[in-house]
Image: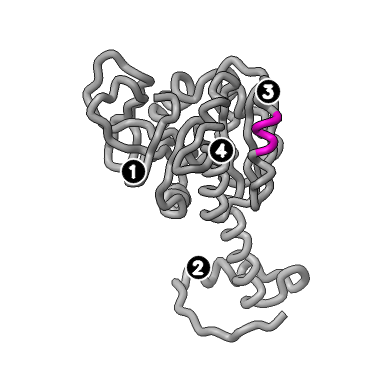
Amino acid sequence: MTKSKIAISMDNGLLRLIDSKVDGSIIRSRSQAIEFFLKKGLQEQSVNVAVLLLKGEHQENALKEIKGTPLLRQQIEFFANHGIKTVYIITQHTKNMNSLISEISYAKINAEIIEKQAKGNAEALSAVKDRINNSFIVMSGDTYNNFDLLKMIKKHADSDKLATMGLMTREKASSYGTAILDGDLVVDFQEKPKHYSTNIVNAGIYVFKPELFELFEDAVSLEKDLFPRLARLKQLVGFFTYGEYVHMGD
């Protein structure tokens, strides 16, 4: 492999830390140490897996056309355009399964349907727990989102929190989950409250660290169980998507 020589400036303390990793056997030089840990850091921050949570009763919405193309196909293309390599669609077995399988056959990336009976979307998401190693995207299966997902992924990496939630504003917030912010942190989250004090709502798309599964033990719903818990722990960051949003059930 061809390598290029470069000159960089580095904090002295960081340089000493790098030099301390040179053991003469596995890592034999300062250059090799810098290359090793740079690759490791980039791999840990990369996001190449997305999960669509699609309730069985919402499968017809995923098959409806938006801008002349079925929603499911649009969602997979959205992920592919932002560097995602694998999409898992978690759903339940219905009469629409053949149509769903037909739609994912158009995918330019790996797309797989996982059938799981679950009481809620958190329980459904646990189906991919053993398949996830790095941060990953989760999106509602009946939601069309179109925005710069790479900016959201960067925000997630920079914040170093367990979860990042896509946000938008709506005049009638009672139909959505609402978020109270302190800077970028979501400090309170309520799912479809009767009375609300904010117009900032959940856009139905998230970036999660795999460590989030450690909080899943008694969680059934992301919105009712997990997000309020993350808000209390100060582990939930908000990101305004500033793009197109359509909920196909509306």
Q: Is residue 243 above or below residue 221?
A: below
Tag 2: amino acid: Leu
Q: Quadrant of the N terminus?
A: bottom right
Front disc: 3 or 2: 3
Residue 102: give x, y in percent of width and height: 68, 37
Front disc: 1 or 2: 1
Q: Contact, CB < 8 Å: mark 4 with mark 3?
A: no
Residue nearer the viewer, 57 or 63: 63
Q: Residues within 10 Å of mark 4 (few under 14, many from 20)?
A: many
Cα gap from disc 3 to disc 2, whole angstroms: 47 Å
Residue 62: give x, y in percent of width and height: 54, 31
Cα gap from disc 1 to disc 2, whole angstroms: 34 Å
Residue 224, label in figure: none
Tag 3: amino acid: Lys
* Figure coloring: one colour
Q: Outermost residue toward the front?
A: 68
| Dot 4 or dot 3, earlier in sequence | 4
Q: Contact, CB < 8 Å: mark 3 with mark 1?
A: no
Residue that appears at 53% across and 55% down: 81
Q: Contact, CB < 8 Å: mark 3 with mark 2?
A: no
Front disc: 4 or 1: 4
Tag 1: amino acid: Phe
Answer whether residue 31 is visible to the viewer in this image: yes
Residue that appears at 47% across and 20% down: 225
Which residue position is annotated with label 3?
Answer: 116
Q: In the image, is residue 200 part of the stretch drawn in magenta?
A: no
Residue 72, label in figure: 4
Q: Is residue 89 above or below residue 146?
A: above
Extent of the magenta region: 98-102
Image quarter of residue 227? top left
| Dot 1 or dot 2, earlier in sequence | 2
In the rendered structure, the answer to whether residue 106 lies left or right of residue 73 reads: right
